[in-house]
Amino acid sequence: MLNFSLSDEQTALRDKVRDFAIKEILPIAWEFDERDEIPVVVLKKAFENGIMNSDIPKQYGGKGYGIVEGVIMTEEIAAACPGLATSIFDNSLGLEPLVLSDKESLKKKYLTKIANEFKLICFATSEPVMGSDVSGIRCAAEKTDNGYRLNGTKYWITNGGIADYMTVFATIDPKSAHKGICAFLVEKEWDGVRIGSSIPKMGQRCSNTVGLHFDNVEVPEENIIAHPGEGFVLAMKTFSRTRPVIGAFAVGAARSAMEYAIDYAKKRQAFGTKISNFQTIQFKLAEMYQKIETSRLLTLKAAWEADTGIDPTINASLAKFYASESAMEVVDEAMQIMGGYGYTKMFPLEKLFRDIRLLKIYEGTSEVQRLIVSGHALSSYEPVMPSLADLPMMKRLTEAERSNADVSGINAWRCRMCGHIHSGDEPPEECLYCFFPKTAFKELVR
Ligand SMILES: Cc1cc2nc3c(=O)[nH]c(=O)nc-3n(C[C@H](O)[C@H](O)[C@H](O)COP(=O)(O)OP(=O)(O)OC[C@H]3O[C@@H](n4cnc5c(N)ncnc54)[C@H](O)[C@@H]3O)c2cc1C
């Protein structure tokens, strides 16, 4: 049965996270953004309040929540600060390849630790010279007697500067593209792991982003998450499960922008009346509301698919690019409604605007999501309607045929070039409209 309501448990979870976001994040986010600094203490509080690692399975000491619960929680944190939402939920990105893997001893060792102690794990596919093209990874994994030796650089790594563990994707041979990609669990303290300076950013300045360098880092056999040839698929499967969460970042940020705009519009006077009385403002709000609601539905659907065992790839991509782009439009309109005040650092719109610009870039750009969806539409998507050449659009029926609405027994031919339908036992010698010959006609199947 189709059901759009949250369970009592999900509602309670949402309320708890909402409370945390408003009490613990909202008051400090602007200060840390200004300082370009990650408030690790807030991440620790989130961990202590069960707002991190929600997707670690119960057998490893986790909550065992699904992606649906993940997006419900994310929306609330992102409404207060998208940058902190990125940092708090980055653990789920870092540990997802491990959750998806079949490496039982590795899961037992690290997932149990991450569930029980305040430990951060980051996710590293991107490099200085590649991001979208994951098959173009260059970080080298060289086979040794005991495992692999890593050499190379990862870039743009969220929480990389503060993470205890790193899920690192590398290749045994850059020329073998996706076939050479493997993944490892690396510990920060291992010899040869170097962490770059925090990368200064336009937005999400409450999140930490760095480069990681690996200098002859020895990875033991037991820390292999994916062997060569398995890593690329694992990265893609991970993204299919984490992209709905990016949709939830967008929903949360857009929702708070709309709420601030409504608040302002109901109080601000112009031309002798509240600006909320102007239809232009009302229609802006209606469209903002529409975009948020649509984004939330798409996001939840993709998350539900992931939890139900349906391949969420397409809806995860749709949710990511639709929600990210809609959020940009919503925040922009909210800023417009707030006039000059929207543009200042005294109100939250300016920060939200900077923060959510990232959503169209990380975890696969909007262009990459369009490639995924259009690839599906043009190949594996199964159409319901007949092809254009087979459309049974009968024309010039007799009155009797029309009154019966029954076209069985009528012979008809469709010109495959211009679509003209010719009734008769044989196709015409030439199309009346486009002059194509008899051979262009196809008999309509009824
Ligand atoms: C703040 C921040 C945090 C991040 N966190 C992480 C992290 O934790 N872990 C991690 O691994 N990465 C992370 N990233 C990296 C992020 O995933 C990449 O930046 C992103 O995937 C895009 O890669 P790129 O920057 O190399 O751009 P490129 O891949 O070089 O793309 C440049 C432009 O070309 C377009 N383009 C590329 N290929 C195509 C194509 N085939 N068709 C059409 N257009 C195309 C892109 O859409 C983009 O507009 C982060 C990035 C940022 C900015």
Image (cartoon, rainbow, N blue to C red):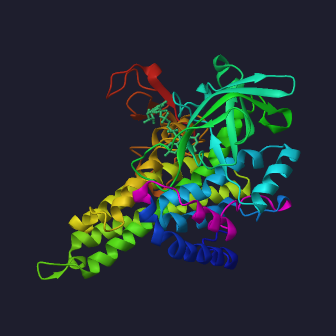
* Residue 248 in view (yes/no): no
* Residue 439 in view (yes/no): yes
Q: Is residue 433 left or right of residue 355?
A: left
- At x 32%, y 68%, the residue is 347
In this view, which residue lies farthest toward the top? 175
Measured along the vertical axis of the image, is residue 347 above or below residue 201? below
The image quadrant that residue 395 belongs to is: top left
- At x 82%, y 56%, the residue is 112
In the rendered image, residue 26, in percent from the top left (x then y), is placed at 47, 70
In the rendered image, residue 263, in percent from the top left (x then y), is placed at 33, 78
- At x 58%, y 59%, the residue is 40
Q: Is residue 342 left or right of residue 163?
A: left
In the rendered image, residue 86, in percent from the top left (x then y), is placed at 55, 55
Query: Number of labelled discs?
Result: 0
Q: Is residue 249 left or right of residue 235?
A: left
In this view, which residue lies farthest toward the left? 271
Q: Which range of residues does the magenta coloring cover? A: 33-59
Q: Is residue 43 magenta?
A: yes
Q: Pick the residue in front: 392 or 205.
A: 205
Measured along the vertical axis of the image, is residue 330 above or below residue 277? above
In the rendered image, residue 319, in percent from the top left (x then y), is placed at 52, 53
Measured along the vertical axis of the image, is residue 51 above or below residue 15? above
Q: Pick the residue in front: 4 or 387.
A: 4
